[in-house]
């Protein structure tokens, strides 16, 4: 089933911050699976190249049921929920 996608109000700022820090950003908004995270980001953290799945939420935004299920079923590293630029900085090892 195709997912309905609506961007959170802070998405552009979050994406711009990842890119300003030199990270690659791939939007997963067209991924057909319900609950799939918003972004795949890649960069260098602690001297290692890493890939991180990222769910963008506003300050008060909550994960939908499908997102909770998808995150729980994912066998890789936990999906990072990012709400603010400070969250991006911490995720990228810049905080």
Image (tube, helix red, strand yellow):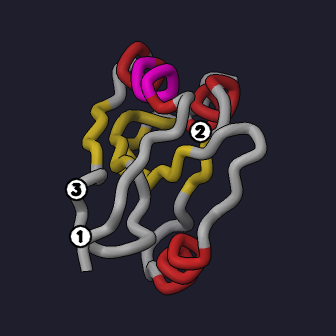
Q: Is residue 40 above or below residue 70?
A: above
Residue that mark 1 sits on: 32
User: Which of marks 1 and 2 precedes in the sequence?
Assistant: 1
Please tell me whether mark 3 sits on a helix, a strand or a loop: loop
Magenta residues span 12-16
In the rendering, which numbered label is found on residue 23?
none
Marks 3,1: beta carbons within 8 A: yes
Q: Say if the magenta span includes residue 25.
A: no
The C terminus: image quadrant: top right
State the CA–CA distance, disc 3 to disc 2.
24 Å
Q: Are marks 3 and 2 in contact (CB under 8 Å)?
A: no
Image quadrant of residue 32?
A: bottom left
Q: Residue at x 32, y 67 (%)?
A: 3
**Circle on res. 30:** 3
Left or right, residue 95 beside residue 13: right
Tell whether 2 sits left or right of 76.
left
* Magenta segment main secondary structure: helix
State whether residue 63 is above or below residue 25: below
Give the mark nearer the N terminus: 3 vs 2. Answer: 3
What label does residue 91 carry, if any? Answer: 2
**Residue 88: x %, y % from top left:** 58, 31
Residue 88 higher or lower than 48, as above or below: above
Q: Say whether residue 25 is left or right of residue 68.
A: left
| Residue 52 rendering spot, x and y as whole percentages | 43, 52
13 magenta-colored: yes
In this view, the residue in front, 54 or 42, is: 54
Q: Which is nearer the eye, 21 or 3?
A: 3
How many C-alpha atoms fall within 10 Å of the one at disc 3: few (<14), some, or many (≥20)? few
SS assignment at label 2: helix
């Amino acid at each position: 089933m195709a997912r309905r996608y609506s961007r959170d109000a802070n998405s552009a700022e979050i994406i711009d911050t990842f890119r300003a820090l030199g990270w690659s950003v791939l939007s997963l908004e067209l991924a057909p699976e319900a609950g799939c995270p918003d972004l795949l980001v890649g960069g260098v953290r602690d001297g290692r190249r890493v890939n991180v799945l990222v769910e963008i939420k506003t300050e008060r935004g909550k994960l939908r049921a499908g997102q909770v299920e998808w995150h729980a079923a994912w066998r890789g590293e936990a999906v990072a929920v990012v709400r603010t630029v400070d969250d991006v900085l911490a995720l990228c090892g810049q905080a």
